[in-house]
Structure formats: structure tokens, C-alpha cells
């Protein structure tokens, strides 16, 4: 909701083309940070769950590795952005250079700090990191709006300041754990192999995930106009509202089930997949209708030309979110290579469709390619799981005990009794 409000303010004040330029500026640090994470945040979660006594070594290795990486990425971005943004104004290009160089190391730090919070089950801090970024953004933008000073430059500065504040908040909140990574004691070199070994296993998968999730923006920058980017950024952000439940589940599921026995992992992950998909399937149709109405009312009638793109992106969001919930089972059991196979196939199909459909149908073709890619990812995952976990496909996609589980969970939460109903009521599931 806060992200949508941010889009409304920037779209109303900057217009479609100005919104497109701002989206291009904000896009590059996120994309670059996703490409150079080298799987370290995920590896931190996995290894800290396996052996928390080596937290100091894992943290220091991660920090020391990503400092030079971020510097190198900043140099490449500084000289590359004028080429990559050749169709954009000189002001937008210069802002993108400064913003990218300063923000990439901050985003890498946010990813590491989020991983620490997740691995320690400090989800209040993790939620604070996720909430404070858009919250501080929208507060800053509202202040600029009221002062009549909202522009491309001032908006970019607000986003940079927000990221810096959130990093500071995270370091203070996790001070006892971050300080372990800054101690001057010699690093145990035996920590290198598990940290970077698992990190490189998941890095290929995460890199493909980043390319898959961001390649649509790259295509827009390369083949379409700033106006197209403005339209797309608005409907894309609005469609991501449908992914809220599944994103929350995915972010909690991996650190929660890592280290469990395989049969318990699949029971919990499959249940989360079924319930989230059912809820979102019920919600999506009326919400899409309301979403189109809100698109014109809040953002302006000029954004209605992208309404068909909004419909497709909403469907893609739910299907893709469900596939990531299921994929957390492979990461938790130390088999990220299976997710890598899925991503390789899906991204190959989707990128090929981008180059075919985007020139023909513009944003609609782009979003259609994403829907097809999401269906491919889900289909491959549903094909893999029964063979890896030795369970029938039917038990993954259907369980009559889910309704009973949901009712009992809601009752327990209302009464304030128990935090983990799955541990008490697994007997209601035909899977366990």
C-alpha cells in the first residue's frame, strides 16, 4: 500500500515520462545489487542455521568480500549508464550515475543485515527493514510535495537518504551481532568453504532470478521509451500487491524450515503453497476489477492505456509467487541446483518471448511473456518435487485438511494461544 502511494505521488507530480525517468534511475542499483550478491545473504541464513557458533567468521567474510565488489560495480555503472540510458535526458543520466554508485553498497548491506535478522528469527527487525524503506520514502515525498519542491532530483535524493537511514537503523538494531563481524580476531579459514560453497550454489539461481525479475525493465530501457517505462512501473507496482501474502511466506519459510527433516519440510511448504494460492485465487478477480478503477482514479486517465498489462501482471504475480513458495523446499534441503535448472529453462523461454512479443505488442507482449514464464516455472517445480521428495503430486496440490488447519489457526491467533499450530494439528493433514 505504501509503495502504491509512492507511485501515485511520483506519477501525479512528474507525469508519465518523468515517472519513467525516475523508475530508470531507481532500477539500476537494485538490478546491480541483485547481480553481485554472490548468494551470500542466503548462504548466511543457511550456515548460521547449521552452525551459529561461527557467526563472526561468516559475517566478516561477507563484509570484506562485498566492499571491493561494490566499488568495482560502481566504476562499471558510472561509465556504463550513459550508454545504457542513451534515450534519457542528461539530468536523468547524471542522477542515475550518482544514485547507483552511492546506493549499491547500501543495498548490499541491507541484504546482509536482512539475512542476519532472518537467520536469528528476528523478524521484527526484518519487517522493520522492509517497512521502513517505502515508509520513509513516502514521508519524504509528501513533505516535498507540500513544499512544492518535488522534482526528479529531489525525489532521487529522498530515496538515497531513506536507504541510508534504514541501513543505520538495521546496524543499531543488530548491533550485538554486527559487532561480531567487525572484531579484529583472525578469521577461521575453514569458514570460507561452507559460506562461499553454498553461496555459489545459490548464486547462479539467484542471478537468474534477478535477471528473470528485472529483464522486463531492461527490455523497456533498450527497446521502448521513458513513457513506456512510466506506464509499466505504475501497473507493475500495483500488481505486486497480489504477491504480498506469498512474499511474506517465502521470506519466512526458508529460514524456518532449514535444518528440518525432509518430510516435515515438504509438509509445511506444500501447505503454505496450497493455502496461499487458494486465498489469492479468490481475491484476484474482484481486486483486478477494483485495480483498474483505482488505476485511473489515483494515477490519472493517461495510465489506463496500460490496464490490460495490469491484468496480465496480476496473474503472473500470483503464479510466480506460488512457485517461489514451493522452491523454498529445495533451498532448505541444500538443493538450490534444482531451482537453478528451473530458472534456466524459464528465463530462456521468457527472454526469447520478450524479443518476439515486446516489439509486436509493446507492454502487453512483455507482460504476456512474463505470464508464460511463470507458468513454466510452476510446472517445472511441480514436476520436480514428487521425484525429489518421493511424494505423490496430488498431496502437493490438494489436502482436504487445509480448511480445518486454517480455521484452527485463526481461532488460536484470536485467542492468543500458541504460535505454531502446524506442530499441534498435523494429524488433520492427509500428508502427515
Image (tube, grey):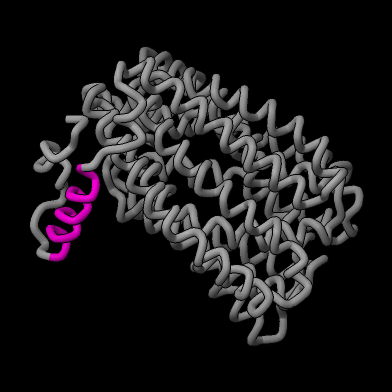
Q: Main secondary structure of the magenta part?
A: helix
Residue in the foreground of this view, choosing between 36 and 320: 320
As drawn, 401 above or below 141: above
What segment carries the magenta color? 401-414
Residue 56 in sight here: no
Residue in the foreground of this view, choosing between 28 and 269: 269
Q: Which residue is rendered at x = 29% and y = 28% of the image? A: 266
As drawn, 322 above or below 343: below
The quarter holding residue 211 reads top right
Q: Is residue 244 magenta?
A: no
Residue 280 in sight here: yes
Q: Which residue is rendered at x = 62% and y = 33% of the image? A: 35
The image quadrant where one finds the C terminus is top left
Residue in the foreground of this view, choosing between 175 and 79: 79
Residue 419 is left or right of residue 247, and the answer is: left
Residue 316 is left or right of residue 402, and the answer is: right
Q: Which residue is rendered at x = 72% and y = 57% of the image? A: 232
In percent of width and height, residue 78 lies at 79, 43
Residue 120 is left or right of residue 320, and the answer is: left
As drawn, 299 above or below 340: below
In percent of width and height, residue 92 lies at 82, 59
Amino acid at each position: 500500500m505504501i509503495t502504491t502511494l509512492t507511485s501515485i505521488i511520483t506519477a501525479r507530480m512528474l507525469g508519465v515520462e518523468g515517472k519513467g525517468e525516475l523508475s530508470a534511475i531507481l532500477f539500476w542499483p537494485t538490478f546491480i545489487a541483485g547481480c553481485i550478491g554472490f548468494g551470500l545473504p542466503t548462504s548466511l541464513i543457511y550456515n548460521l542455521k547449521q552452525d551459529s557458533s561461527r557467526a563472526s567468521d561468516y559475517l566478516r567474510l561477507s563484509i570484506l568480500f562485498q566492499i571491493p565488489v561494490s566499488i568495482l560495480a560502481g566504476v562499471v555503472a558510472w561509465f556504463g549508464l550513459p550508454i545504457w540510458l542513451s534515450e534519457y535526458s542528461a539530468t536523468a543520466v547524471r542522477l542515475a550515475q550518482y544514485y547507483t554508485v552511492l546506493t549499491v553498497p547500501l543495498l548490499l548491506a541491507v541484504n546482509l543485515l536482512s539475512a542476519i535478522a532472518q537467520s536469528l528469527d528476528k523478524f521484527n527487525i526484518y519487517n522493520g527493514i522492509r517497512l521502513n524503506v517505502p515508509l520513509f520514502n513516502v514521508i519524504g515525498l509528501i513533505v516535498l510535495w507540500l513544499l512544492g519542491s518535488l522534482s526528479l532530483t529531489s525525489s532521487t535524493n529522498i530515496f538515497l537518504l531513506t536507504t541510508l537511514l534504514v541501513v543505520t537503523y538495521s546496524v543499531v538494531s543488530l548491533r550485538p551481532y554486527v559487532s561480531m563481524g567487525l572484531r579484529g580476531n583472525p578469521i577461521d579459514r575453514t569458514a570460507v568453504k561452507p559460506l562461499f560453497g553454498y553461496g555459489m550454489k545459490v548464486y547462479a539461481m539467484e542471478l537468474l532470478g534477478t535477471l528473470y525479475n528485472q529483464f522486463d525493465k531492461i527490455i523497456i530501457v533498450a527497446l521502448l521509451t521513458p513513457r513506456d517505462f512510466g506506464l509499466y512501473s505504475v501497473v507493475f507496482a500495483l500488481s505486486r500487491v497480489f504477491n504480498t501474502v506469498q512474499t511474506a511466506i517465502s521470506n519466512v519459510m526458508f529460514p524456518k524450515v532449514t535444518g528440518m527433516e525432509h518430510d516435515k519440510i515438504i509438509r509445511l511448504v506444500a501447505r503454505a503453497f496450497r493455502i496461499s494460492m487458494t486465498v489469492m485465487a479468490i481475491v484476484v478477480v474482484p481486486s483486478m476489477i477494483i485495480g483498474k478503477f483505482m488505476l485511473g482514479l489515483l494515477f490519472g486517465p493517461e495510465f489506463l492505456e496500460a490496464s490490460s498489462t495490469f491484468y496480465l501482471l496480476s496473474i503472473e504475480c500470483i503464479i510466480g509467487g506460488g512457485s517461489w513458495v514451493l522452491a523454498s523446499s529445495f533451498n532448505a534441503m541444500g538443493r538450490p541446483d534444482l531451482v537453478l535448472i528451473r530458472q534456466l529453462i524459464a528465463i530462456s523461454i521468457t527472454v526469447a518471448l520478450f524479443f518476439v512479443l515486446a516489439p509486436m505488442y509493446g507492454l502487453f507482449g512483455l507482460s504476456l511473456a512474463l505470464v508464460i514464464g511463470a507458468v513454466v516455472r510452476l510446472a517445472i517445480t511441480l514436476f520436480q518435487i514428487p521425484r525429489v521428495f518421493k511424494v505423490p503430486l496430488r498431496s502437493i496440490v490438494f489436502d482436504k485438511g487445509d480448511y480445518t488447519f486454517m480455521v484452527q489457526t485463526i481461532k488460536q491467533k484470536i485467542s492468543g494461544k500458541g504460535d505454531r499450530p502446524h506442530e499441534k494439528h498435523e494429524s488433520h493433514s492427509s500428508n502427515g
